[in-house]
């Protein structure tokens, strides 16, 4: 059987001074898809829905990468002073992509801001700044320690439980926003011990979708984190084969 084609959205920088506009993505994302047995297809920002739909017709899954912050004003919230916005062209395209993925019930994995996008697109919301919303939380973004890690509490019977199983588990942490209310149709599959949501997954029989707030593709990830991508690619193959996924 041929390897599944996995779309990977890209970050975007507008032209500035003498620098041209460009799209880019950290190599860890597409390297992880390759290692897990998929074929990554990089997706630039699409401005036309018809163009996006034509591309999605050829893909079997989508990976939503991390990056700067989503604009809370697009979801009816005020702009917090700590928010560092994504380029507007990227966010418009990503939201368009997420709507199409949802309508198609296409397998999707979101990482960091990608997980947050899954949540808000489906009716959930976000904490805009963890130190304000949870003053006693751990430092999820530590400028003095970019390799800061914390433990996870896994929910039994979830994808994260299947990926990591028993034993001591520590994941990287580099975010100041987080999932607050989980979207309908989704459930929490992992939390930091301070209560911050670190992973969510679809609770719907017809949609293989999950996300992690931490970054399993990053240099600060552990070898065990690679199993997240293996789980995703295996799930995409099962959806292609018409199998029902069981957590």
Image: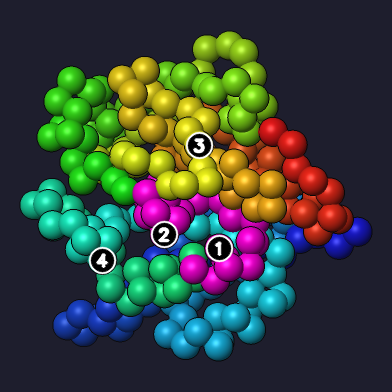
Residue located farthest toward the top when viewing the structure as drawn: 167
User: Residue visible at 47% across and 88% down?
Assistant: 48
44 relative position to 204: left or right: left
From the image, tell me which residue sits under label 3: 187
Taking depth in this image into account, of 112 and 210 the one nearest to the observer is 210
For the residues marked 1 and 4, what is the alpha-carbon distance in whole angstroms? 18 Å
User: Residue visible at 41% across and 68% down?
Assistant: 95
Decide which of tag 3 and tag 1 comes sooner along the chain: 1
Decide which of tag 1 and tag 4 comes sooner along the chain: 4
Decide which of tag 1 and tag 2 comes sooner along the chain: 1
- Tell me whether circle 1 and circle 2 mark residues in contact (CB < 8 Å): yes
- Tell me whether circle 3 and circle 1 mark residues in contact (CB < 8 Å): no
Decide which of tag 3 and tag 2 comes sooner along the chain: 2
Q: Which mark is residue 102?
A: 1
Which region is colored magenta? 99-124
70 relative position to 62: left or right: left
Q: Give the image's coloring scheme.
A: rainbow
């Amino acid at each position: 059987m041929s390897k599944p084609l996995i779309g990977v959205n890209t970050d975007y920088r507008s032209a500035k001074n003498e620098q041209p506009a460009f799209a880019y993505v950290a190599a860890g994302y597409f390297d992880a898809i390759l290692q897990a047995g998929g074929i990554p297809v990089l997706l630039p920002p699409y401005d036309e829905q018809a163009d996006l739909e034509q591309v999605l017709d050829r893909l079997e899954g989508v990976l939503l990468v991390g990056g700067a912050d989503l604009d809370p004003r697009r979801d009816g919230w005020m702009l917090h002073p700590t928010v560092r916005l994504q380029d507007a062209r990227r966010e418009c395209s990503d939201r368009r992509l997420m709507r199409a993925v949802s309508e198609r019930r296409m397998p999707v994995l979101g990482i960091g801001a990608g997980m947050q996008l899954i949540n808000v697109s489906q009716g959930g919301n976000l904490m805009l700044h963890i130190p304000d919303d949870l003053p006693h939380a751990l430092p999820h973004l530590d400028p003095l320690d970019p390799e800061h890690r914390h433990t996870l509490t896994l929910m039994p019977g979830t994808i994260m439980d299947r990926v990591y199983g028993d034993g001591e588990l520590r994941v990287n942490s580099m975010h100041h926003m987080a999932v607050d209310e989980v979207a309908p149709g989704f459930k929490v599959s992992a939390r930091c011990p301070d209560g911050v949501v670190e992973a969510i997954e679809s609770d719907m029989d017809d949609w293989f979708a999950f996300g992690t707030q931490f970054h399993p593709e990053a240099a600060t990830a552990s070898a065990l984190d690679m199993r997240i991508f293996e789980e995703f690619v295996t799930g995409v193959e099962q959806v292609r084969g018409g199998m029902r996924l069981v957590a």
